[in-house]
Amino acid sequence: MTTQKKSTLFTGRPVWAEVSLSSLCYNLRAIRAFVNPESEGRKTPRKILSIVKGNGYGHGGSEVAKALEEAGSDWFGVTSAGEGEAVRKAGVQKPILALTSFWPGEEDQLLQNKISPAIIRCDQLAALESAAARRKAGKRSVGIQLKIDTGMNRLGIAPTDIDCFARQYEKSRLLKLEGVFTHFASSEVFAGPAASQTNQQEESFHCAVARLRGLGIDPGLIHLANSAAIATRPETWADMVRPGAILYGYHPGYDPMERRAEAERQLTLRPVMSLRTRVISIRNIPAGSGVGYNAKFVPDRPSKIAVLAAGYGDGIHRALGNKGSVMIRGAFAPIVGIISMDVTMVDVTDVDGVALGDIATIYGWDGDQVLPANLVARSIGTVTSDLLCAVSSRVPRIYLP
C-alpha cells in the first residue's frame, strides 16, 4: 500500500500518524527471542512487560496493548489507574502494573479493573487493604508489586525500609505480592562518572530482595531491565523485562556511541510510527525575504517555500526550526523559520516538482527510505520518547496490519 493510498483512509486536516502493528509485533517477538536465548536453556522463559504508558509512547495505548496481547505480551505497564482502565476497556485481559503507584482515592479504580499498583511507600498497604476489605476481596487476591529505590531517588521504598514493608504486608490478609522491581537511572551509560551506577543499583536491589526473602516473603517476579538494559546488560534480565522505546522501534542513546552499533546488530528493530502531513501552500519568495515569526530564516537566493499542515500543536518539535528536515518526493527538505502551532515551512527549492497536496514525512518510513525519530531527537538534544509522546490527540492514528 502506498503512502498516497494510506492517506485517503480519513478526511479532514491533512496530518496523520501511521502505526504499523506488524512492526510493533515484530519488535515484541525480537525482544522475547533475545532475552530467551536457546543456549541458556531456561525452563521458564522470561516474561515481557510491555510499556504502554504515555498513550503507548504516542502510538495509542489501548490499540497497541490489544495488538501486543495478541502477540503474546505477558504484562502491561501504565502510569496510573486511569491509563490502566482505558487499556482494560479496550478488552485487554493480561495483568497490568501501575508503575507510578496510586493517589489516595484511586484504590477502587485499581481494584475494579484488576490493576496491580506499585507500592512506593509502606503506608500505602493499609489504604489498599481497607479498599479491598470494602469490596470483600478474597484472601491474598489483590495483586501489588513492590518498587525499590536503589539510587535513582525518585519513586520506591528505600532498601532500609524492607523490614517496614514486611511488617505491613504481614498484617494484610487480602494483598498478594506479585513482584519486586527497580528502575535504572543510567543503564545506557558505559563511560564517565555514571558508568558504575547500574552495577551499584543492581547490587542494592538484590540485597533488598534477599532481605525480603530472609523475612519469609516470596518476592514473586523479579524485574529490573528497561530498554537499554534489555539490549546491553543480560545480567539484569531476571524473571521479566520491561521494554519501552525499543518496543516502538528505537534503541536509546548509548554512551559511548559505539555501543549503539553493537546493540542494533544484536537486536534489530523496526520503527513503528510514521508522522505525515501534506503541502497546503507554496510560495516563491525573493532573496532577503523573511520566513515565519521574527524572520528567523532569510534566504540568500530566490526560494520556493512549502507550507505543511502540521506544527508543534501536532507533535513537530519547535526546536526543529532551522535544524530539522522532512522527506518530500524521496528527498530531504530543510525546515526553515520558527515552527508554528499549526504549520511548518520547508525549503523545497532543490526538490523537483513539489506540488500542493504532496505528502511530507516528519519521521518514519517513506517508501524504502526512513527518517528515524531517534536521529531527529538527537539533532535537537532530546530523547526519542519526547518526540513520540508529543504527537497530540488531534492527530489521527491509522493502524496498519
Image (cartoon, rainbow, N blue to C red):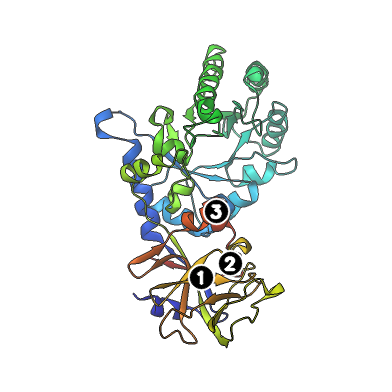
Residue 47 seen in the current view: no
Numbered mark located on residue 322 in the image: 2
Q: What residue sits 66% from the left and 17% below the top?
A: 167
Tell me how far mark 1 sits from mark 3, CA to CA. 38 Å
Q: Mark 1 points at which residue?
A: 334
Q: In which quarter of the image is residue 340?
A: bottom right
Amino acid on which disc 2 is placed = Asn
Q: Disc 3 on helix, strand or loop?
A: helix
Closest to the camera, between mark 3 and mark 2, is: 2
CA neighbours of label 3 inside 10 A, class few (<14), some (14 to 19), many (20+): many
| Precedes in sequence: disc 1 or disc 2 | 2
Tell me how far mark 3 sits from mark 2, CA to CA. 39 Å
CA neighbours of label 2 inside 10 A, class few (<14), some (14 to 19), many (20+): some
Q: Name the residue under label 3.
A: 87
Residue 19 located left or right of residue 312: left
| Precedes in sequence: disc 3 or disc 2 | 3
The spot of residue 70 in percent (x, y) is 39, 53
Q: Which of 38 and 257 is in front in this view?
A: 257
Q: Disc 2 on helix, strand or loop?
A: loop
Q: In which quarter of the image is residue 365?
A: bottom left
Q: In which quarter of the image is residue 392?
A: bottom right
